[in-house]
Image: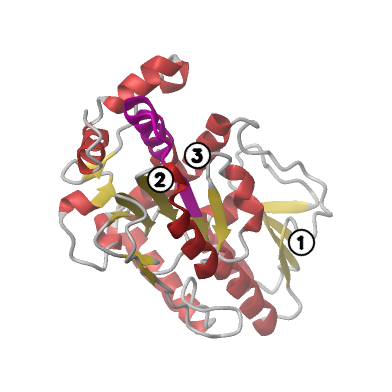
Amino acid sequence: MVYVCSLDINEKGNHEYSVCRTVEELYKLILNENAKEIVIKDDFQELYFTSIGLETLIKETRRLNPRLDIHTYQQKPHLGHKIHEMGDSNAIGLINANEKISHMHHQVSAARRLSKKEQQRADAYKSLLNTLQIKLDKVLPDGEKLESPSIAIKEKAYKRIIYIKEITRVRFMDTFLYYLQEVIRFKRGVSSPLVVIESHYADHKKYLYPYADLYMAGINLELLKGFMVKAMDTPFLIILDRSGLKEPCLKGEVVEVFYTVSDLNDLTLSLPFNKIISYEDSTLYVPHKKGFNALSSKEKIDYYTSMKTMKYFLRLLEVGE
């Protein structure tokens, strides 16, 4: 039997294949003798795996069950169903595509808290992962441990660096950073370049960040060092780190690090609430605005400028409210 892992509600399946909706179902299929082929689509991968985690899952599954053909849709798109593209070609459309992924992360986080029974099921599948020897997000394909390379910022090329370290995905973060750049440009008349760091093997995601001045799939220290020195005639720099590594890759007195978590339990560090971006009112928080997409450009900027979290960042940058 062929199974397609997809979150698309329009993906119904037919006599040729069945649809897998959750990672729990996927783990069951890996051990199912009747499963002959598993196809993992983009939306499913984005929600449940980093690129490194998925590579490891596929590698270990093939080793443990050679008869099972497991692959991504891009590796072998022979079933011929349509892949729905995320967003349109403009920057806001692509940001919205990222936000849809963030929303799914939020839904998963909320589902984890539904009941004790569900938590017991989740624990059982964690045990299954250990049995399969899959260490998602912690092991490179060659088995070496993931470490966090870093640069100590000594030269003050920038007056302030805002560093967003993603632990787990939070909704509207891409939109928030986009409007942070716009507000700085409006109030100070200067640009605030954005550096986006994704995980290894994520070159295909570059098109999701047309507003980024530098995109890296994995951390390239030499490239980053050059960017640090150049400074681009602006006092501010923004970094969005989705590399999957534990530590920020920049350190220094001008670097202000903030951590995004969809659930405060995702944090392993003890941090003040003004260093955390989550869904809790006690932390920095980007609320949902109903009907936001219908607002004019000016109304959107006004909305974000009036936001409590935006005002905090502006004070930190000494931009003024």
Looking at the rendered structure, the number of numbered marks drawn on it comes to: 3
**Identity, as a three-letter code, of the amino acid under mark 2:** Gln
Is residue 158 found left or right of 2 in the rendered image? left
- Of labels 3 and 1, earlier in sequence is 1
**Residue 100 on image: x %, y %:** 50, 39
- Of labels 2 and 1, earlier in sequence is 1
User: At 47% from the left edge and 78% from the top edge, which residue is drawn?
Assistant: 146
User: At 34% from the left edge and 45% from the top edge, which residue is drawn?
Assistant: 235
The reply to whether the magenta stretch includes residue 144 is no
Q: Disc 1 marks which residue?
A: 75
Which labelled disc corresponds to residue 107?
2
Q: Disc 3 marks which residue?
A: 100
Q: Element under label 2?
A: helix
Q: Which residues are magenta?
A: 177-196
Q: Element under label 1?
A: loop
**Identity, as a three-letter code, of the amino acid under mark 3:** Lys
The reply to whether the magenta stretch includes residue 178 is yes
**Residue 237 on image: x %, y %:** 39, 48
Cα distance in 3D space between marks 3 and 1:
24 Å
Quadrant location, the N terminus: bottom right
The 10 Å Cα crowd at callout 3, few under 14, some 14 to 19, many 20 or more, is some
